[in-house]
Amino acid sequence: MTAAPNTTTTKPRVLFVCVHNAGRSQMAAGYLTELSGGRIEVRSAGSEPADQINPVAVEAMAEDGIDITAASPKILTTDAVKASDVVITMGCGDACPIFPGKRYEDWDLADPAGQGIEAVRPIRDDIKARIEQLVSELLPASTGAK
């Protein structure tokens, strides 16, 4: 006896975009990857990517048990936007191409670049709360309590 095939094999696809793809978008991608348990395809990119992830962002995420050390800043491409269902921008302005049929959100978050850990923690916590909300929207609970 085999289970019925899953007819919804396509995972939601989310793209996080900020200028340098070194702080906010990387923290958001780290949280979404972790909190979705792999049920959401996660990408991040920047309009002007930095040469490395912000070490303070890495430290702030490590404090919450999430390792983003393997991530690296990537250039924003039109293909990445086309391949996404949800595009969340974080201060990239008009650099992000707009395509019909996509869900766009702009998260007004402080830039952690050049900030110490004390300033980055509240940004991290804000991102985590937004990611928890996003997960609840993209992955509605399938075990509804009566």
Image: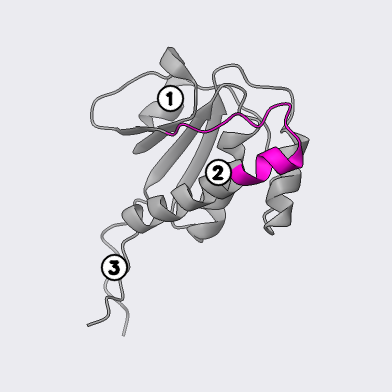
Task: Using the image, tell me which numbered label, if any, was put on residue 29.
Answer: 2
Helix, strand, or loop for circle 2? helix
The answer, for residue 25, to whether it is visible in the render is: yes
Question: Considering the image in quadrants, where does the C terminus appear?
Answer: bottom left
Tags 3 and 2 touching, CB below 8 Å: no
* Residue under numbered circle 1: 79
Label 3: few (<14), some (14–19) or many (≥20) C-alpha neighbours in 10 Å: few
Q: Which residue is drawn at 32% across and 68% down?
A: 141
Q: Give, as a single range, the part of the protein colored magenta.
A: 107-122
Q: Residue at x 73, y 33 (%)?
A: 54
In three-dimensional space, the C-alpha distance between marks 3 and 1, rounded to whole angstroms, equals: 30 Å
The answer to which image quadrant residue 98 occupies is: top left
Residue 41 image position (x, y, % from top left):
46, 47
Residue type for callout 2: Ala
Q: In this view, does 74 lie to the left or right of 35?
A: right
Question: Considering the image in quadrants, where does the N terminus appear?
Answer: bottom left
| Circle nearer the N terminus (3, 2) | 3
Looking at this rendering, what residue extends furthest in the front direction? 118
Q: Which residue is drawn at 73% across and 23% down?
A: 51
Residue 112 image position (x, y, % from top left):
65, 32
Residue type for callout 1: Asp
Task: Using the image, tell me which numbered label, if any, was put on residue 5.
Answer: 3
Looking at this rendering, what residue extends furthest in the bottom direction? 1
Looking at this rendering, what residue extends furthest in the top direction? 94
The answer, for residue 84, to whether it is visible in the render is: no
Nearest to viewer (mark 3 / mark 1): 1
| Circle nearer the N terminus (2, 1) | 2
Q: Is residue 53 left or right of residue 96?
A: right
